[in-house]
Amino acid sequence: DTGVSQDPRHKITKRGQNVTFRCDPISEHNRLYWYRQTLGQGPEFLTYFQNEAQLEKSRLLSDRFSAERPKGSFSTLEIQRTEQGDSAMYLCASSWTQDRGTHEQYFGPGTRLTVT
Amino acid sequence: RKEVEQDPGPFNVPEGATVAFNCTYSNSASQSFFWYRQDCRKEPKLLMSVYSSGNEDGRFTAQLNRASQYISLLIRDSKLSDSATYLCVVSGRSNFGNEKLTFGTGTRLTIIP
């Protein structure tokens, strides 16, 4: 399978704990995105990388959230001191972009986080 | 006003019927437009891009009206497998000049046998 993969698929954690999610994009894609989706809503943009550079972060991404893409391949999203409001599906997507245009994004299966 | 607004749904439609979804967007500088499909507890998957001239892919037709900032998706001869949530997606530039996709909340479609 050469699509976007995410790990773990499900995570249950207690409030106050730290969690880390991993995303492996489609190998030739240079852009990687993180989104958060809650029930009944569309995905909300969190942050994105072009190669290893983090180009933008949403104001939704509080100081407790950090994302990295150290070698321009896989990415990690860490949430520190989790809160119940962090419970959501965390989606990763990737795309290939050579110019300033917008190209289709391909999503991974997501990591469903439940904070108890 | 939300950046991307969709019909509230849900739509419950008999098999074989034609169904239309509408979507409006607020940023007149938006450049690219897409429809994504999302099955229950699955990730969104690209259904089709929307071009200025309108485009068709089998039973699916997408149209864009830039003047009215309006996008539509038409599904003809609907099938049970079309049951899903349909997300309207618009690209634009963030305050930092980077491209970003903004998703609507989605419209849930259920095809009834």
Image (cartoon, rainbow, N blue to C red):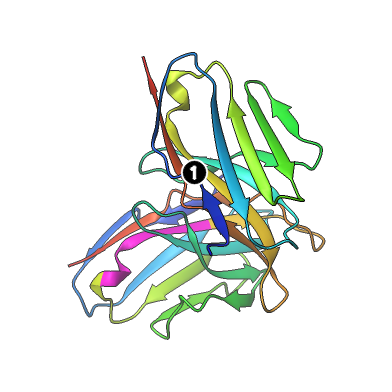
In this rendering, position of residue A36 left or right of residue B3:
left
Q: Residues within 10 Å of mark 1 (few under 14, many from 20)?
A: some
Question: Is residue A2 visible from the viewing direction of this image?
Answer: no
Question: Is residue B102 visible from the viewing direction of this image?
Answer: yes
On the image, numbered disc 1 is attached to which residue? B7
Indicate the amino acid at tag 1: Asp
Which quarter of the picture shows residue A100? bottom right
Residue at the (53%, 53%) spot, across then down: B5
Residue at the (63%, 55%) spot, across then down: B25
- Give the image location of residue A30, x and y in percent: 69, 61
For mark 1, give the secondary structure: loop
From the image, give the main secondary structure of the stretch colored magenta: strand
Please state the chain letter of the residue tagged with numbered disc 1 in the rendered image.
B
- Give the image location of residue B85, x and y in percent: 45, 39
Does the segment drawn in magenta span residue B43?
Answer: no
In this rendering, position of residue A19 left or right of residue B107:
left
Which residue occupies the foreground of this view, B16 or A13? B16
Look at the image and give the residue range highlighted in magenta.
A85-92
Which residue occupies the foreground of this view, B54 or A18? B54
Which quarter of the picture shows residue A102? bottom right
| Image height of A54 relative to A1, above or below | below
Residue at the (17%, 67%) spot, across then down: A116
In this rendering, position of residue A84 left or right of residue A103:
left
Residue at the (73%, 75%) spot, across then down: B97
Which quarter of the picture shows residue B73? top right
